[in-house]
């Protein structure tokens, strides 16, 4: 199989372990185990309704919170995957690297900076749904990225954790795509590409 020209990544639960970061954030809250469990359930690893999540947090703690404050505090719990960052730097020697992620610009930028990904991947190759005006799983999101990179879909490979939103959507847009369970799995799946093979 011909190696891809561009390798594009989802952010949450792909380039960093969001579950670990969320568990860390919740563990630091002064509340009962029952409330911690409820908050975690409402969060759904970032896929839950934010209004419900914030309303529950404020009810449990009496403190105000919004998306920006939450993102800043969650970023303190993000574990930087040094091995993965090294692999990305190696991949960058032979591939165009990019990120396509759903979310708000401020929220996702805070995470990118916490991971120092903004020092590895150029800003014009970081595509955030709120910024480009279209979100996954809409194939238009993948088409936007391919066009911005100046590449046909067949030369783009996507890594993401969600089967429908990431993998199936990318394939529907003509990309190759691989599903990962988190950054450790991503690093493992990137190894063959460092050696010129496929996942």
Image (cartoon, rainbow, N blue to C red):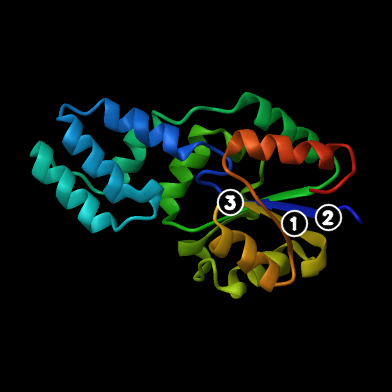
Q: CA distance from mark 1 to mark 3?
A: 11 Å
**Of pointers 1 and 3, the one earlier in the residue sequence:** 3
- Residue occupying the point 40% across, 29% down: 77
Q: Position of residue 34 (x, y in %)?
A: 17, 36
For residue 10, the mark is: 3
The answer, for residue 67, to whether it is visible in the render is no
Q: Circle 2: is it few (<14), some (14-19), or many (20+) Cα within 10 Å?
A: many
Q: Is residue 121 left or right of residue 37?
A: right
Circle 3 — which element? loop
For residue 76, the mark is: none
Asked whether the beta carbons under mark 2 and mark 3 sit within 8 Å of each other, the answer is: no
Place residue 140 in its image quadrant.
bottom right
Q: CA distance from mark 2 to mark 3?
A: 16 Å
Which residue is under mark 2? 4
Q: Position of residue 4 (x, y in %)?
A: 83, 55
Q: Position of residue 33 (x, y in %)?
A: 19, 30
Which residue is under mark 1? 157
Q: Nearer the viewer, residue 178 or 137?
A: 178
- Residue occupying the point 30% across, 42% down: 40
Asked whether the beta carbons under mark 1 and mark 2 sit within 8 Å of each other, the answer is: yes
Circle 1 — which element? strand
């Amino acid at each position: 199989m011909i190696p891809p020209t561009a390798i594009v990544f989802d952010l949450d639960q792909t380039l960093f372990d969001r579950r670990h970061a969320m568990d860390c954030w919740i563990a630091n809250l002064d509340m009962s185990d029952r409330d911690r469990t409820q908050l975690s359930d409402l969060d759904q690893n970032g896929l839950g309704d934010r209004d419900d999540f914030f309303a529950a947090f404020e009810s449990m703690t009496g403190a105000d919170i919004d998306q920006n404050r939450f993102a800043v505090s969650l970023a303190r719990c993000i574990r930087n995957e040094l091995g993965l960052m090294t692999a990305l730097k190696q991949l960058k020697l032979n591939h165009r690297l990019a990120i396509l992620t759903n979310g708000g610009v401020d929220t996702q930028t805070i995470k990118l900076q916490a991971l120092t990904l903004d020092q590895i991947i150029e800003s014009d190759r970081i595509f955030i749904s709120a910024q480009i005006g279209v979100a996954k799983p809409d194939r238009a999101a993948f088409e936007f990225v391919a066009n911005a990179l100046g590449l046909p879909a067949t030369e783009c490979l996507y890594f993401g954790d969600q089967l429908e939103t990431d993998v199936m959507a990318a394939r529907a847009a003509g990309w190759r795509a691989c599903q990962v369970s988190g950054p450790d799995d991503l690093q493992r799946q990137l190894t063959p590409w460092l050696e010129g093979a496929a996942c």
